[in-house]
Amino acid sequence: MKLVIFEDAAYEQFYPLTYLRPTFDLRCGSTLLREKVERAFGRKADVLFVREWLREAYAVRTSAKVNDLGALAGDDLVLVNGRGLWIGDDFPAAGRDACAMAGADVVYVTLTKGTAARVQASDFAGFLAASARAVPAAKTDLKLLDYPWRLIEENGAAIRDDFKKLGRSGVHGTLGPTAVIWGPQDQVYVAPGAVVEPSAVIDSQEGPVIIEEGAKVNPHSRIQGPAAIGRDTQVVGGKIREGTTLGPVCRVGGEVEESIIHGYSNKYHDGFLGHAYVCEWVNLGALTTNSDLKNDYSAVEVKVKGQLFDTGSTKVGCFIGDHTKTSIGTLINSGTVLGMMSNILGAGCLLPKSVPSYVMFMDNKFYKAGLKQLIGTARTAMGRRKVTMTPQEEALIQRLFDLTKDDRDELIKKSRKEMMIQRGLR
Amino acid sequence: MADAIAERVKSVTAELLKVDPAKVKDSARFVEDLGAASIQSIELVAAFEEEFNVEMDQDEALNVKSVGDAVAYIRKCIAEQHGK
């Protein structure tokens, strides 16, 4: 059989998290959504389908075929919507004809080789729709995630599921003297090469804690399960509270609660991050803090595709795109979206609810940022972690600069006029 | 016309950087001679865009080092965008 994972049109609802990655490469728990699907079927994806303008940059990161309709021929197929959360044990079997829907959206389709051969389509969307029509409906408990805050809501359950399926526990790395596992020992996994330094507390009373290879937990850190600390990530003190995932190669301190830091990002200093999703190559300056609860306990609104959307949830933090940096003392309101590659000088004022991509935000105003300069800074940040920006990724960043232009141009023009008045130039 | 542009560039520069207008000569460098911090450089570009109703490439604009070069660059932008 061939395992096929696709992203559907809902990728826009996850912006800015999905500007540089397909929906199925978002993290929830200690693994990516795609990795959960691959684990469910015991194999790597054979073919991946992503929006066309992401194809080139993504294809160099994977050994799977990308957007290759011809690669579907000649085998049983499992077609999986990549924003599905594949946790639990109730997964479909390959080698039969079935389709599970969530409303109008496909969760998965399984096709036998013979049925697949009879499906005619000129593109993948057509192939998927025709496949779904051609086979009997099946019920499923699998969820499709529809907005960024769903990743946060599900993160604790996803960590528990990841821990269970990891099938390992105990300390295989180093537990320093006076470091404590507070709670069931079998709910903790410290991988070989990971170090929990003296006076750190791993609290597994309420859920499992995964500490992956090469991770280091510095003295006076408290990690409260369910939590996952990624490969080569350093917890530099402070409180990592329940429901938190720190992806690989991060440096994190302060207080973090029910949040996902995708990987390769820094929140080194004090400051609170709650109910937030932070993409890669982000740096949060000292005392950057976000709210995740309104003072009147009403539901938090988030800007999705340019419109404020009622999340229906009272606990929603912020969503921060790749390569964005905040200054010391940046204050972020609940439900705030910060685009990618922006440089935010908060200066102690509460940020606006939405900051577009590729801007310099300072003195409560939006200014242009130079694309070449931004790319240069990104290369430097990546080089510090021995990662090279590919030409395809640079082309994608340039394309997104144009794609997001309308989001920022009017704000920049308005800010210019305000600045002229404030500086006595008008 | 060229002199008018230069005068306006110098006036905006002096006002925004709060420096003596007499110091804002063609040869004056924004950072070394007029003390522009990186944040002020960004504000200066925005102010020139607003003053002359042009859009500048931010990378190009931030590479302009002196007042005289700024006048030349703004003149080029005006010519390209307004045909003057």
Image (tube, grey):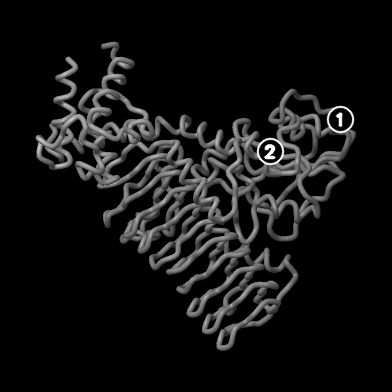
Q: Which residue in the protein does label 2 denote?
A: A59
Residue A100 visible? The answer is no
Relative depth, front residue between A144 and A412 = A412
Task: Residue A119: name its quadrant.
Answer: top right
Q: Residue furthest front?
A: B27
A124 lies above or below A229: above
Chain letter of disc 2?
A
Element on which disc 2 rests: helix
Give left or right: position of A221 versus A227: left
Which numbered marker is on residue A117?
1
Q: Position of residue A210 (x, y in %)?
A: 63, 70
Please report contact status of discs 2 and 1: CB closer than 8 Å, yes or no: no
Q: Label 1 sits on what residue type?
A: Ala
Q: Label 2 sits on what residue type?
A: Ala
Residue A249 visible? The answer is yes
Q: Residue furthest top?
A: B83
Which numbered marker is on residue A149?
none
**Residue at position x 35%, y 43% from top?**
A360
Q: Earlier in the sequence, mark 2 or mark 1?
A: 2
**Residue at position x 57%, y 65% from top?**
A233
Q: Closer to the observer: label 2 or label 1?
A: 2
Q: Position of residue A59 (x, y in %)?
A: 68, 38
Q: Position of residue B13 (x, y in %)?
A: 18, 35
Element on which disc 1 rests: helix
Q: Do pointers 2 and 1 mark residues of a single chain? A: yes
Relative depth, front residue between A419 and A13 = A419
Mark 1 neighbour density, 10 Å: few (under 14) some (14–19) many (20 or more)? some
**Residue at position x 46%, y 30% from top?**
A402
Task: Residue A197: name its quadrant.
Answer: bottom right
